[in-house]
Image (cartoon, helix red, strand yellow):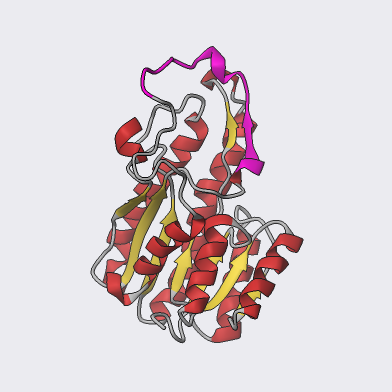
Amino acid sequence: MKLKDRVALITGGSSGIGKAAAIAMAKEGAKVAITARRMERLEEAAEEIRELGGDVLSLAGDVAEPEHVQKLVEETVAKWGRLDIVVPNAGINGVFAPIEEITPDEWDQTHHINVRGTFLTVKYSIPHLRASGGGSIIVISSVNGNRIFSNFGFTAYSASKAAQVAFTKMAAMELAQWKIRVNVVCPGATKTSIGENTFARNIDKIRIPREYPVGMIPLEQRAAESEEVASAILYLASDDASYVTGTEIYVDGALSLFQG
C-alpha cells in the first residue's frame, strides 16, 4: 500500500496508460479522480476501479478547457480534502502529414490537448499540492520529439511531446521549493486506444526508406503493455522516488535507441 490515503488525479483515465495508472494506484491505496471526454468509457473505467475496492471520482470533459480542469481539481479536493499526485496523461496523436499540408487548426488541436491540457492540469493542481505539503506530478510524454525523430509526418505530435518535457523541467525547478516533484514518462510503442485519434495523410510523399527493419523493438520485439508504463508512473508517484525530479524515464524496450 505505497499510496495509502493519498489522492491522485489522472487525465485521460478511461483507457490505455491512464486507466492502467489509475488501477495501479488504486491497488496501492490511493483515492483516484479520473477524467476523459467520453462519459460511457469513463464510467466503465470507474466501475472497474470500484470492483477492485478502489475509491474513485469521474468527471467527463476536455482537458484543454480551463473550466473543466478547474472543476475537476476542486471536486477532487472537496471529496477527499487533499491532492497528492497529478498525472497529465490525456493526449492525441492528431494528424500525421507533411508540414505543408498540416492545417493551422490541426496543429492547434494537437497542441491544445497535449500541451495546453498538461499546463492547465498542473496549473490548477499546484495550490492543492502545496497545501498537502508536497506531491508528485508525472507528465506522460513520448519518445517521439525527445529521442526519436524518424517518424515522418509526426511534426505536430512530436513538437507537442517535446514541449511537455521542457515544461516538466521548468516546473521541476519552480516547484521544488514546495517539495513538489515533477517528472516525465516517455513511452514508446504501447498498446492503447490512441489510434482512434490518429489521422495519417500523404505521409508516403515525404517518407525516406530505411535499411533496417522498421518498428523493431530490441527488448522482446513487442509493444509495451499499458501496465508496464503504469509501473513507471507508480514508482514516480511513490516515496520510492522521493529524490527524483526533473527527469525523463523512457519505457520503450530500447526502441528509441534503435530508431533515434
Identify the residue at image location x=53%, y=50%: 116
Q: Quadrant of residue 181?
A: bottom left
Question: Can you give x and y, in whole percent of width and height, for residue 5 in the image?
Answer: 46, 86
Please state if 180 lies on the left or on the right of 30 as rendered.
left
Which residue is more in the foreground, 211 or 117?
211
Report whether residue 57 is seen: yes
Q: Magenta span covers which residues?
A: 195-212
Relative horizontal placement of residue 44, taking residue 233 as reference (left or right): right
For the N terminus, give its image quadrant. Answer: bottom left
Residue at position x 47%, y 41% from top?
A: 160
Frontmost residue, 2 versus 243: 2
Residue placed at 32% from the left, 33% from the top?
258
Q: Position of residue 110 (x, y in %)?
A: 57, 40
Q: Is residue 208 magenta?
A: yes
Q: Is residue 238 magenta?
A: no
* In front of the other: 86 or 171: 86
Q: Position of residue 111 (x, y in %)?
A: 54, 41
Does 133 sit left or right of 224 as displayed?
Answer: left
The image quarter containing residue 212 is top left
Furthest residue toward front: 220
Q: Residue at x 45, y 36 (%)?
A: 158
Percent x, y for residue 169?
31, 53
